[in-house]
Image: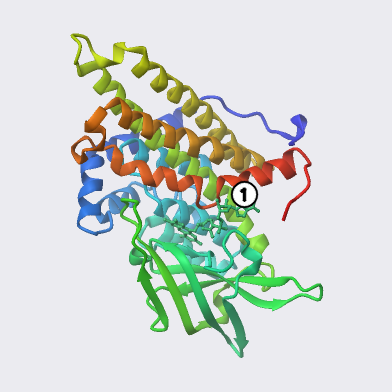
Amino acid sequence: MIEADARPSLPLTDSDERRLLRESVSNLAESFGHRYFTEVVAKNEPPAALWEALGEHGFMGPSIAERYGGGGGGLTELAIVEEEVSAAGMPLLKLLISPAVAGAIVEGHGSEEQKMRWLPGMAAGTDRFSLAVTEPDAGSNTHKISTRARRKGDTYVLTGSKVYCSGLEDSNWVLVLANTGTSDDGRSQLSLFMVEVDHPKLHRTRIPVAMRAPEHTFSVSFDDVDIPADRLIGTEGEAMKTVFSGLNAERIMSAALCCGVGRYALRKAAQYGREREVWGQPIGAHQGVSHPLAECHAQLEAARMMMMAAAALADAGAPAGEAANIAKLLAADAGTKAVDQAIQAHGGNGIADEYGIADLYFIVRLQRIAPVSREMILNYIAQHSLGLPRSY
Ligand SMILES: Cc1cc2nc3c(=O)[nH]c(=O)nc-3n(C[C@H](O)[C@H](O)[C@H](O)COP(=O)(O)OP(=O)(O)OC[C@H]3O[C@@H](n4cnc5c(N)ncnc54)[C@H](O)[C@@H]3O)c2cc1C
């Protein structure tokens, strides 16, 4: 557990600047709205106009340093952007990876040349990044990955395959975790590489999934992909440290997405509960309808507080792992429950596309599995917060 005196003081409410950011993102997102999201999903297109508008207003890279074209803020600002676009019914998975994870990794571990090369495009939203970590035979045990990168002069040669790599259809770059050797004690030495998505020896196949989102997910194979050595991010063999710096960002952004979608669903459910009458009074007057929604609201608010606390800790440079994991756990559960309850409150209409709720179910449900499963989060809390022994 984090010692109380090691915590910086945490804000309980938004500063004026952050309130303005929240309002501006919300106004912009609401001008697109959930209908725009469903249209691009139905057309199998990326949300290019939304992405461009967010980039133009500086909302794509508020956490990236100003000297690299970003807003000079922190994860708090980026989480506000994700929460507000999600609260408008447009959760963007892409923001979790690019700029959150890739931003934290490149800014934290890239050379000056790499930062100058990738961060300005990331902050503008004109360059987009994916992350390829998961493998069919390794799963949650990242140390078991078998994708290999062998050094050959000034290049590395990458061979292997990944599954569930999201957003590749609309990315220029993908961060790939690969094995570059074995240490004396038999542990895999992992390294992280920035790879061009359109490399001719990178092959991808879309994986059909139940989730309705603009980001598609792919299995990817690397068939002797040559990577210039200057695309190695951080130190060779120490990628777990490098990737680690992006994990808090990913968990906090995942929590922000769930809080936003949860708010969107509850807002719709409350409106329906006020308007729909079947027994001569609004259905929201029945406590069987209102109490579960009220409970979802309470749980979402608790998750939001934890998410903002985690972001504040990360921005203050304080240990944020425990808070980020708890925020993700609470928000994924609360967001999923809120969407499910909003469907229930709509009766049969809850399933109809016209009401714009059920199509968001799987994007929040996914957050209980990815980017890290709730069981692996509970393992983290059991071990790090409670000092319990590891089972694996
Ligand atoms: C739509 C989608 C998009 C994704 N996008 C990406 C992406 O962009 N990049 C990427 O790299 N990955 C991505 N993933 C993969 C995702 O991160 C993994 O699915 C997730 O980390 C779980 O790994 P797994 O599926 O291999 O499950 P497994 O590791 O096979 O686990 C299966 C089940 O067993 C549980 N389990 C495993 N080990 C333990 C343990 N020690 N203790 C308790 N329970 C355990 C898990 O919690 C889970 O419930 C995506 C997945 C999906 C479905």
Beta carbon at label 1 within 8 Å of ligand 1? yes
Image coordinates for residue 97, horizontal then vertical, percent:
47, 56
- Where, quadrant-wise, is the C terminus in this rendering? bottom right
The residue sitting at 56% across, 78% down in the picture is: 230
Q: Position of residue 235 (x, y in %)?
A: 67, 70
Name the amino acid, label 1. Met
The outermost residue toward the right is 185
Provide the residue designation for mark 1: 376
* Colouring scheme applied when the structure was drawn: rainbow
Image point (43%, 37%), residue name = 336
Above or below residue 358? Residue 189 is below
The N terminus, quarter of image: top right
Q: Give percent across and percent down for residue 360.
A: 33, 42
Image vertical order of residue 338 relative to residue 226, above or below: above
Give the mark count.
1
Label 1: few (<14), some or many (≥20) within 10 Å?
few
Figure quadrant of residue 32:
top left
Residue 25 in sight from this viewpoint: yes
Q: Nearer the viewer, residue 203 or 73?
A: 203
The residue lying at 36 percent from left, 72 percent from top is 205
Pick whichever, 281 or 131, lies toward us.
281
Q: Nearer the viewer, residue 170 or 382?
A: 382
Numbered disc 1: secondary structure: helix
Q: Is residue 131 above or below residue 90?
A: below
Residue furthest bottom in the image: 153
Residue 73, can we see it? no
Compared across the picture, whether 366 is left or right of 346 comes to right
- Give percent across and percent down for residue 100: 49, 52
Residue positioned 24% across, 59% down in the render: 44
